[in-house]
Structure formats: structure tokens, C-alpha cells
Amino acid sequence: MRARPDVVVVGAGIVGLSIAYHLARRGASVTVLERSGIGAGASGVQPGGVRQQWGTRVNCLLARESMRFWADAGELLQMRLDPGFRSCGYLFLAHSGKALLRLQDNVSLQNELGIPSRIVAPLEAAELVPGLDTAGVVGGAWGDQDGYFDRPHSLVEAFGALADVQIAEVVGVGDEGVVRLAQGAELRADAVVVAAGVDTPRLLPELPIRPEARYLFLSDPIRERLLEPLIVSPERSLAAKQLADGRLLASDLGALGDPETKQAVWRANVRSAVEELLPQLVFVALPTLLAGTYDVTPDHQAILGRVRERVWVAAGFSGRGFMLAPAVGRVIAESVLGDREDPVLSVLDAGRFAEGRAVPEPQVV
Ligand SMILES: Cc1cc2nc3c(=O)[nH]c(=O)nc-3n(C[C@H](O)[C@H](O)[C@H](O)COP(=O)(O)OP(=O)(O)OC[C@H]3O[C@@H](n4cnc5c(N)ncnc54)[C@H](O)[C@@H]3O)c2cc1C
């Protein structure tokens, strides 16, 4: 047997590709099997938001490590064009004492783990976000390192360019590293990693991952810069940001259901929150509805680690797989190669649901 095993990764989204990258760097021979194309799933939809402001230790740690990778991504991924990370800052708003207390708890945890976020008073929030109406705001949490990639999909492609990606649909993953392909062929690998996003339960039906439709509204490009930091108001159900190309991105965080019938309600919710908080945006039309799917678990946290003999999983990212992918790639690669079991794996393992160890993330967007 070779010193380093052959590994098959299922799924060429950002997570599977990052795992392949970290495995290859450690000397493994890796093949990524993808049924459609690089970035064909959620990784090709997401707009590239990256933040370290989380309310659970595991997410803070994974986000902090990933942020370091993202800072050097152009060089590490041998990119010819800068993917354009802009640390515009994320401002979480509180409209009640209870919400502010929650933000304070999260900021304490983040600071303890080396993340430089802080609580701001309404006056400072108004200075950070020109035009923000703070009449109903009691405070906020600010992270000035959080931000957005101008070209997030170029990162998915850059990871893809460094990997051996084969187009093939996987229809079964057995114990002992057997991978069954749609064409009828079978492969045998020393290790298999399933990173198939929302379709992961088709291969590993024992995992509690379900699809959740998510929607973002987009304006046409606007020349003036109207909203620089990203703002999130969980109590007003609003997240908004102006992208580098000038389009305003806004979402009703509670948008659930059929877009045909509900779209007008979501748009009205966004409009009413914008009227209250960002009056400079009231005349911005939001004609485009961008739809995508989150792969969601019961506690809105990923499932990571070994689930069967020679089979690992990294899925269920519940809306944050892009930003966490670098650290997740490292953690899974080390586990597959038997180098190290990162402590994150004993928190985000598949067994936590049955054993009452769920770790709900309070700072979900
Ligand atoms: C609207 C929206 C906005 C988002 N915004 C952000 C954000 O700002 N920041 C952030 O960090 N995250 C964001 N996310 C979440 C992020 O996009 C996902 O968590 C991340 O892309 C998941 O990556 P993945 O590689 O796990 O899955 P995917 O990108 O879905 O990749 C899975 C791949 O597996 C392939 N596949 C599936 N089944 C098989 C099979 N049987 N055989 C072979 N191949 C298979 C699929 O074709 C696909 O290419 C957002 C998501 C949505 C929908």
C-alpha cells in the first residue's frame, strides 16, 4: 500500500475542492467526481460574503482560520486575477436590549478567540454606515475585517483548476471506500469524502440534511456608492449590501415558501425595513430575485468527519460553506490522512443529534 492513500471526493463545490486542495498539499492522490461541473451547486450562486462574527466557538475558529487563507488566496491558488476581497465590515444591529445582550455575548466569545469585533453605540453605528437611521437602534456589533469578494466564483474556479476533476455522477458510496457511478462502473478508494452539498443525503441517507430555498433581491447596478458596510438587522429581518459592481443586494431573512406567491410580501418586508433603516435606498428598485438552496441541518451547523468505514462527510453548511471552506478542507484532509483529529470534529460530528449535543448557531443570517 502507498504511504498516502488514494482519495475520492464527491462534489466539485467550494468545500469538495478545498478538501482536495488540502489533501493534495499533503501528498495524497485525489480525484474529484462531479456530476455537472465546477461550482454547479450553491457555490456557483453565493455572492461571496465572508465574516468572523459568529456565536459558537466552532464557527469562530473555522472562520478565523479561513480568513487567513482568504487573505493569501490569490497566491495560494495561483490566481492570475485578484479575486478582490473588500473588508467593508459587517454591522449587526440590535433594536432591543435582549438582542444587544446576545450580540455582547457573541462579541465576548469572538474577542476571546482573537476576532477583533466590538459593540458600538448608535452614534458610532451611524458614522460607520452613512445614511443609517438609528432612531430605533440600541446598539450594534461591528467587525471591520468581515467583507465580500468581488469575484467569489473565480475562487471556486481557481480551486478547481488545481484539482483532478472528473465528470461522473456517483450513485452509491459503500463501506470500504466503494464508489458506484451512474454509468455502472465501480471504483475502490482508500478513502471517500462526500461533499455533495444539498444532495449529500442521497448518498448518506442517515444524515439529517434538508434543502431550504433562499432568496436574495438584487437591484440593477447603481453608479453611486450608497451602502458600504453590510448591515444585518435580525429583528427587522433584513440583510443589505451594495456589491462591487454597484448592485444592491437585499434579503428578507425570513423569506420562506413559494416565490410565485410570496415574492411580493418579501419585497414589501425589505422595503419597510429599508424605509426605517436606510432611507437613502427607498427609491432603489429590486427587480431581480436570485434563488438558491441552503443545505440545512437541525442545528444549522455543518456535519464533518468520518461517518462510515473509509467514508467522510463535509456537508450541511446552512449558508456559510463558502467562507468556512479553507479551514474545513484542512480539518477533513488531516482526518482522512490520519494525521490529526481537529477538536472541531468532536463537536460537529454526525452523532451529535442522536446524543443531544446539538450546537445551535445564534448568529445565523
Ligand atoms: C443564496 C445563497 C447565498 C449564500 N451566501 C453565502 C455567503 O455569502 N457566504 C458563504 O460562506 N456562503 C453562502 N452561501 C452558502 C454557500 O453557497 C454553500 O454553503 C457552499 O457553496 C456549499 O458548498 P459545497 O461545496 O458544500 O456544496 P455545492 O456548492 O452545492 O457543491 C456540491 C457539488 O456536488 C455535486 N454533486 C451532488 N451530488 C453529486 C453526485 N451524486 N455525484 C457527483 N457530484 C454530485 C453538485 O453538482 C455540486 O457541484 C449561500 C448560499 C445561497 C444559496
Image (cartoon, rainbow, N blue to C red):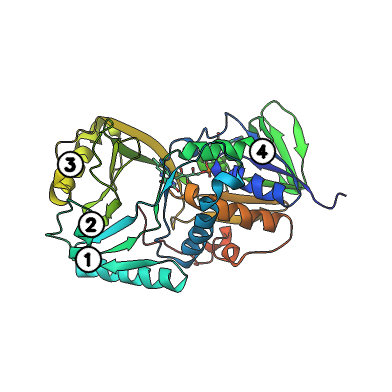
* Residue matched to label 1: 139
User: Of the residues shown, which amino acid type is indicated by label 4?
Assistant: Ala
Question: Taking the image as drawn, is residue 221 in sight?
Answer: yes
Residue that sits furthest to the top in the current view: 183
- Looking at the image, is mark 2 or mark 4 nearer the viewer? 4
Marked residue nearer the N-terminal end (1 or 2): 1
- Left or right of 98? Residue 71 is right
Residue at the (21%, 67%) spot, across then down: 121
Residue 235 numbered mark, or none: 2
Amino acid type assigned to the residue bearing label 1 in the image: Gly
Task: Confirm if mark 1 falls within 8 A of ligand 1.
Answer: no
Q: Which mark is residue 163?
A: 4
Residue 330 image position (x, y, % from top left): 62, 55
Which of the marked residues, 1 or 3, is nearer the chain's N terminus?
1
Query: On the image, numbered disc 3 is attached to which residue?
Result: 281
Q: Are marks 4 and 3 in contact (CB under 8 Å)?
A: no
SS under mark 4: loop
Name the residue rendered at 14%, 36% in the picture. Answer: 283
Q: Residue at x 67, y 53 (%)?
A: 333
Circle count? 4
* Contact between labelled residues 1 and 4, with CB atoms less than 8 Å apart: no
Q: Earlier in the sequence, mark 4 or mark 1?
A: 1
Residue at the extreme left: 135
SS label for mark 1: strand
Lower position in the chain sequence, tag 4 or tag 3: 4
